[in-house]
Image: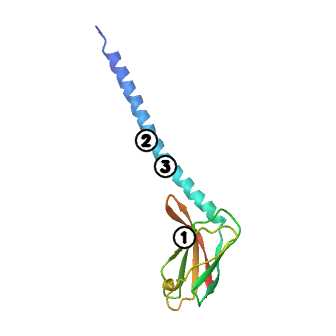
């Protein structure tokens, strides 16, 4: 029989402490990994947006269409948000959800439902799709009507 039970208790205690430390390290690693992955995703979208320049170059008041021009740089964008506004109001946001390649010129469909009365400018903001969500680029381009 075992006469000295103190040694057995110290071994069990040491193993429990090691197990708790490993569990704590695992939990901390999961949290840190999620933070790092989220940060790199935002950096990726930000770097893509630096190379993007989509400008509204023409507005046709008869057909109520906007011509967009993409200058050189980067991969294809997933779409643009178009907003007509005047000094006091903005119209609804139109989502042009078609890819626009570098050096491409595109014309939208009839946007009369999105144009408020007295609109005097149109603003265009590019976006990329990231994890099924639209990630808007920070810079917008305007055209005075």
Q: Which mark is residue 97?
A: 1
Secondary structure under tag 3 reads helix
User: Could you tell me residue 35's position as x and y percent?
Assistant: 50, 51
Q: How many marks?
A: 3
Q: Earlier in the sequence, mark 3 or mark 1?
A: 3
Q: Relative to the observer, which residue lies in front, 5 or 55?
A: 55
Q: Relative to the observer, which residue lies in front, 111 or 12?
A: 111
* Closer mark to the observer between disc 3 and disc 1: 1
Mark 1 is surrounded, within 10 Å at the Cα level, by few (under 14), some (14 to 19) or many (20 or more) other residues, namely few
Contact (Cβ within 8 Å) of mark 3 with mark 1: no
Secondary structure under tag 2 reads helix
Q: Residue 4 occupies which quadrant of the picture?
A: top left
Secondary structure under tag 1 reads loop
The residue depicted at 50 percent of the width and 77 percent of the height is 93
Q: Which mark is residue 34?
A: 3
Mark 2 is surrounded, within 10 Å at the Cα level, by few (under 14), some (14 to 19) or many (20 or more) other residues, namely few
The residue depicted at 37 percent of the width and 20 percent of the height is 11
* Above or below 114: residue 24: above
* Above or below 9: residue 71: below
Q: CA distance from mark 3 to mark 1?
A: 29 Å
Q: Earlier in the sequence, mark 2 or mark 1?
A: 2
The residue depicted at 54 percent of the width and 54 percent of the height is 39
Mark 3 is surrounded, within 10 Å at the Cα level, by few (under 14), some (14 to 19) or many (20 or more) other residues, namely few
Q: Earlier in the sequence, mark 2 or mark 3?
A: 2
Which colour style is shown? rainbow
User: Could you tell me residue 95's position as x and y percent?
Assistant: 52, 74
Kindly identify which residue carries mark 2: 27
User: Could you tell me residue 32's position as x and y percent?
Assistant: 49, 46
- Classify the position of the N terminus by image quarter: top left
User: Could you tell me residue 56's position as x and y percent?
Assistant: 63, 79
The residue depicted at 34 percent of the width and 17 percent of the height is 8
């Amino acid at each position: 029989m075992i006469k000295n039970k103190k040694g057995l208790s110290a071994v069990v205690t040491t193993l429990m402490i090691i197990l708790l430390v490993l569990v704590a390290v695992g939990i901390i690693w999961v949290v840190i990994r999620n933070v790092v992955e989220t940060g790199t995703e935002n950096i990726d979208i930000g770097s893509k947006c630096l190379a993007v320049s989509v400008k509204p170059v023409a507005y046709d008041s008869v057909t109520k269409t906007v011509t967009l021009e993409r200058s050189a740089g980067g991969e294809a964008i997933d779409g643009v948000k178009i907003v007509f506004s005047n000094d006091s109001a903005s119209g609804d946001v139109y989502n042009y959800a078609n890819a626009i390649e570098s050096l491409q010129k595109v014309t939208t469909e009839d946007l009369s439902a999105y144009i408020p009365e007295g609109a005097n400018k149109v603003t265009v903001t590019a976006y990329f799709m990231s994890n099924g969500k639209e990630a808007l680029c920070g810079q917008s381009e305007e055209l005075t009507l």
